[in-house]
Image (tube, rainbow, N blue to C red):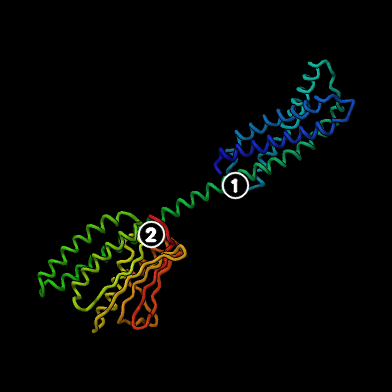
Amino acid sequence: MSPVTSTRALYALWGLFWLLMIVVALADERNNHYIQWWEPLVWEVSSCIVATCWLALQRRVSKRWDEYLDYPARWFGKHLVWLPLIIPSFVAAVYAIRHAVYAMTGEVYEHKPWGFLLFYESIKLLLFTSLWLCIIFGFASFTLWRQERERLLALQKHLAESQLAQLKAQLQPHFLFNTLNTISSLMQVDVERADRLLTRLADLLRSSLQVGARHMTTLREELKLLELYAQIMEERFAGRVALIWNIADDALPAAVPAMLLQPVLENAFKHGVERSREPVTIRIDANCRDEVLHLTIRNSGAVLAAAPEMGIGLRNCRERLEVIYGQRANLELVQDGDGVTAHLTIPYTHE
């Protein structure tokens, strides 16, 4: 709630309060034959006019006391210290209005002696002022809490974006160095294949720069990058790996963090293909169930360690998921028969 909205809500509540007071006063004196119908209206309206003037003044000067909202006793003290001025001025103004209105109608306004009247109005004003100060304090405290909360959320968003930028800055050199090492291993033994890999690396870098400029992308775009990376790795491990793609059509528009899956696929090549003497199958699956995007990358020919340690790539992926989704996303590695499966779950949203 903004300060303007808070002030409007306070005045709306104030108006309803005085409307109720007027209705009650008219109802109480309806059957009193010694009082004319308009007299209760004059009494309450005169009090309302003067009290509203004091409220408007309070709203104008209240900002200077907002710094004491964390110290309620001091905040209330700053307001109540003005009661010795408010009480006599309120009584004088209210009864001046009533006498003037009665005089204009040719009537005489009669009331209790001034001493009793001042005592009675002082008690009533003390209770009335305390009630409304509590309401005003509640509105002001809630508004301050909302502003602090919005500032905190903005700060958290800024920190999260900074953390994501740092994680992506870690990931891109890591990805580039690993790919260049792959090409370097072929330079002395197969120049034609190395040249082919360099061309595909250029395509991959061009695409990754376009996608990497955003924090989020579609699974469709993410898979294009993944296929380019897979082609490079298939060239390196020719005859030793086969990839199977099983992607549901309804999963393609899903929003995913940019360049999220490449480290996971790289992990399958590193721990599956590189360490296996037998041909390895890598299967990539994606589907949506119950508003959740499920992504799995399974490689055969690997055994998960009893206490597996994630490298920089997978650790980076897990940290990015936590920053973006909190506990709603997950990345886990599990032993799956004769292979290892990386299973990612992400809330399903459209990019």
- Residue assigned mark 1: 142
- Residue assigned mark 2: 254
The kind of residue tagged 1 is Phe
Helix, strand or loop at label 2? It is: loop
As drawn, 301 above or below 99: below
Q: Earlier in the sequence, mark 1 or mark 2?
A: 1
Q: Can you see residue 312?
A: no
As drawn, 191 above or below 54: below
The kind of residue tagged 2 is Ala
Label 1 packing within 10 angstroms: few (<14), some (14-19), many (20+)? some
Q: Can you see residue 132?
A: yes
Residue 180 horizontal/vertical position (percent): 19, 67
For the residue pair 130 and 252, the one nearer the viewer reads as 252
Residue 244 horizontal/vertical position (percent): 29, 72
As drawn, 60 above or below 138: above
Is 284 left, or right, of 135 in this rendering?
left
Callout count? 2
- The residue under the point 24% across, 58% down is 207
Task: Tell me the tag on residue 266.
Answer: none
Is 268 left, or right, of 116 in this rendering?
left
Quadrant of residue 129 in the image? top right
Quadrant where the N terminus is found in the figure: top right
Is 324 left, or right, of 279 in this rendering?
right
Residue 234 horizontal/vertical position (percent): 21, 72
Quadrant of residue 271 in the image? bottom left
Residue 105 horizontal/vertical position (percent): 80, 16
